[in-house]
Image: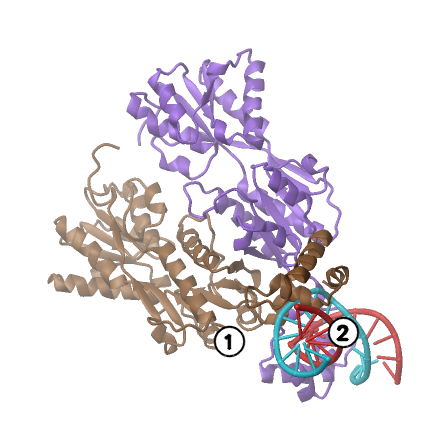
Chain colours: A brown, B purple, C red, D cyan
Amino acid sequence: MREVAAKAGVTPTVVSRVLHNKATSVRVSEATAERVRQAAQDLGYRVNVMARNFRERQTMMIGVLHGIGFPRHEFNGRSRYFACLMDGIVEGAFDHGYSVTLCPKLLGGSPEDAMADGRFDGLIWYSTLQSEENHRLIKGCTVPLVLIHTPAATYENRFASVMCDNEQGIALAVDHLVGLGHRRIAFAIESDDLFGEHTVRLKAFRDHMARYGYRVGDEDVIDVLTNREGLHRYFAGGIRHTAILGVHDGAAGALVELAPEYGVRVPEDLAVVGFDSTQYCEQLRPTLTSISQPLAIMGRCAAEMLVKRINGDTIHHPQVIFPCGLDVRGSTTPTHVR
Amino acid sequence: MREVAAKAGVTPTVVSRVLHNKATSVRVSEATAERVRQAAQDLGYRVNVMARNFRERQTMMIGVLHGIGFPRHEFNGRSRYFACLMDGIVEGAFDHGYSVTLCPKLLGGSPEDAMADGRFDGLIWYSTLQSEENHRLIKGCTVPLVLIHTPAATYENRFASVMCDNEQGIALAVDHLVGLGHRRIAFAIESDDLFGEHTVRLKAFRDHMARYGYRVGDEDVIDVLTNREGLHRYFAGGIRHTAILGVHDGAAGALVELAPEYGVRVPEDLAVVGFDSTQYCEQLRPTLTSISQPLAIMGRCAAEMLVKRINGDTIHHPQVIFPCGLDVRGSTTPTHVR
DNA sequence: ATGAAAGCGCTAACAA
DNA sequence: TTGTTAGCGCTTTCAT
């Protein structure tokens, strides 16, 4: 920059004004400006972004965190959860000129650093795991933060939040099954992973079934366990339901995958519905009917709310709840040609 | 930091040494160090990462670019190409403490900034599109750079490079088809997207077919075009081959998808093989046999080579070529139970 | 319309 | 073992 200034016969101040003072009345004569631009061009000058970030206390970067206690999410995992969410976040961030950074320390190491060290202008936090540690981290966050999957009320509306309407999604699934004539409907959970939204879904199931006048007893909540042991026990004991709603695609998918081992036909003997409608549903045979969350849209919304927060704009609805959809596939409707 | 120093009764220098001088003989008495740590803790001090980056001219971030002229790649696109590659890159980067940033300007706007403005310690460039502009950008890059899909020789080995062995992959596919008894084998290209590796694959096809003594004439190279018009013409004219190898999964998938319209059965009338073995293959019916690139591994390798370059370590093989595999699926072998 | 000067927070060379 | 000093590249008052 000094060199450019020297070459153009001005001071660095002027160079800065010409090259970086966007639009705001650049009080520099056009002749000088042109000389500066020419010099910069000749010297192949590039602004040093780090110096600028440092000086401006603004990085134009947002970080995406998922708290401590999870393995790293994969873009190409079995579920497309992370891929969908990130596509939305990246889209929303890019629209406003923000970069999106994935950063190693955040994901298991020491997120507290990222939450206060000036690295990011803002953060998006997605996690259903409500550990004490993550709680503490969020409460101590000193930069704008948007939550995904966690109600804004959890932190006295200090942070904006994006969620899907779990109750409505579950209702959709129950309606679908009842409409198909099912009466004995169970809900599959993983008791070793029953946090946040998962409990909400179970409760929504009970509530909506009650609305139809169907009682949900203990025997109608199948604990498949993350290792599937509970599921084997259920199948081994003979199925006592005609339809099962899984707390998420993983649980529901396990049902579809293991059913053949026990001579259970899906959907003829047992209809199955998942939650999330990830790509995994398409890979199963039969394909898995599932409640869909508009993940990409939720990600985009989160990014946009975050940008607003960063800019100090008021957010009118700090809690946005998106409706779920229902993707009907082979696990609830008999297959004709395939 | 000043406050911490004041509270601990020392100078900022000492604070810096205690808190950030990793391991390197921290010539500070333990008593003082403890006082500093305590003060930092009490004040909730966090280092300002931007200030440090600025001072150290090191950001511990790497950028991932794909050059100008492409749309943004999606994590959850039809192909899992980007998801696989990024998983590998992120994994490799995280192992060495580097963050990975996706940044809006890179993807269409002005990558030249990112290539020299101090934002990144290094860059990974993936692209098959060999435009003049991208050429110029790469040549002018002033930070360590690793190429994916472009031979190191293209830039006089100035940059390390990671590729898959296209020749060997194509050979694998031809062998498979010949082994199944096919003799009239065609190659499907998109002439409006025939760059870099795609031409290599076509040439490899010609060469390997020649090794079997099969001549590849113009009529054996089907130009499906990105809009599929050529493919419709081919089918409409009646198929003249028993097997077709696509330049990538997109081209091959189009064959599988359109065949039924023309009463062509896959694989009975026509066997089809793709290239890349993306998730898309699993979604087609029949599923698509395809040559696989170890994308995640290539991504990881690229990240690791980049870290070495950044650290000034010598790289013994600046050009790493990974062998391809062959994922046999329904489009080349008759389906039994499905 | 342009320039001078100060300072963002941190680290490293050198001095004590 | 600890302190002093200077400066990374940039922007921003404030003065000219």
Quarter occupied by the N terminus of chain A: bottom right
Answer yes or no: do the residues labelled 1 and 2 have beta carbons within 8 Å? no
| In this view, B283 is above or below A139 | above
Left or right: residue B155 compared with residue A198: right
What residue is drawn where x is 40% and y is 69%? A130
Which of the 4 quarters of the picture holds residue C16?
bottom right
Q: Which residue is mark 1?
A: A142
Q: Nearer the viewer, residue A138 or A284?
A: A138
What residue is drawn where x is 22% and y is 62%? A205
Q: Nearer the viewer, residue B61 or A235?
A: B61
Q: Which residue is mark 2?
A: B26
In the structure shown, which secondary structural element does the residue marked by tag 1 occupy?
loop
| Residue A58 image position (x, y, % from top left) | 56, 69
How many marks the image carries: the answer is 2
| Residue B198 image position (x, y, % from top left) | 54, 30
What residue is drawn where x is 35% and y is 15%? B237
| Residue B189 visible somewhere in the drawing | yes
Left or right: residue B10 compared with residue A332: right
Residue type for callout 1: Thr
Residue type for callout 2: Val
> In the drawing, what numbered circle is on residue A200?
none
Q: Nearer the viewer, residue A85 or A183?
A: A85
| Residue A25 image position (x, y, % from top left) | 56, 68
Nearer to us: label 1 or label 2: 1
| Residue A217 visible somewhere in the drawing | no
Alpha carbon distance from label 1 to label 2: 30 Å
**Chain to which mark 1 belongs:** A
Left or right: residue B146 compared with residue B102: right
In the structure shown, which secondary structural element does the residue marked by tag 2 occupy?
loop
